[in-house]
Amino acid sequence: MAERKIRSFTDLEAWRKSYQLLIVIYKITLSFPKMEIYSLVSQIRRSALSVPSNIAEGFSRNSKKDKRQFYYISLGSLTELQTQLLLSRDLQYITKDQFDKIAQLTIRVSKLING
């Protein structure tokens, strides 16, 4: 099987999976309590948005050092998101099943970024 040429950040599997995660996060936070809209929901969405955004920005950088720095930032945002998801589960804003599915996706994204 021939490897596909990567021409854009959208060709990166890490970006595609992290974008998929972002969509899931936006949809799931629609059901959070209204009192969380400017706090937890906002923070979760910012963290989730930061992951594919930094992968995209890192892709456009010329030096390996710069690329790596943006990929590290995306990992930091992913870890923030994981913490916020734990809180959301523990506050019962999301179910254990929802949490487990999203957590698996965050683990997959982390492995792709680290790979």
Image (spheres, helix red, strand yellow):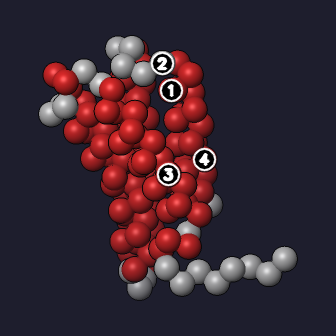
**Secondary-structure class at tag 4:** helix
Q: Earlier in the sequence, mark 2 or mark 3?
A: 3
What separation in Å lies between label 2 and label 3 (alpha carbons)? Answer: 19 Å
Q: Are marks 1 and 3 in contact (CB under 8 Å)?
A: no
Q: Are marks 1 and 2 in contact (CB under 8 Å)?
A: yes
In this picture, residue 27 sits left or right of residue 37? right
State the residue in front, 16 or 57: 16
Q: Nearer the viewer, mark 1 or mark 4?
A: 1
**Secondary-structure class at tag 2:** loop
Q: Label 3 sits on what residue type?
A: Gln
Q: Label 1 sits on what residue type?
A: Phe
Q: Residue at x 60, y 51 (%)?
A: 111
Residue 72 visible in image: no
Q: What residue is shown with label 2? A: 95
Q: Position of residue 24 (x, y in %)?
A: 45, 42
What separation in Å lies between label 3 and label 4 (alpha carbons)? Answer: 11 Å
- Which numbered marker is on residue 23? none
Q: Earlier in the sequence, mark 1 or mark 4?
A: 1
Q: Are marks 2 and 3 in contact (CB under 8 Å)?
A: no
Q: Earlier in the sequence, mark 4 or mark 2?
A: 2
Question: Label 3 neighbourhood size at 10 Å, few (<14), some (14-19), many (20+)?
Answer: some
Q: Nearer the viewer, mark 3 or mark 4?
A: 3
Q: Residue at x 36, y 42 (%)?
A: 26
**Secondary-structure class at tag 3:** helix
- Which numbered marker is on residue 108? 4
Q: Residue at x 46, y 56 (%)?
A: 19
Query: Would you identify the image quadrant in which residue 89 lies?
Result: top left
Q: Are marks 3 and 4 in contact (CB under 8 Å)?
A: no
- 75 over 4 or under it: above or below: above
State the residue in front, 95 or 76: 95
Q: Position of residue 51 (x, y in %)?
A: 40, 54
Q: Earlier in the sequence, mark 1 or mark 3?
A: 3
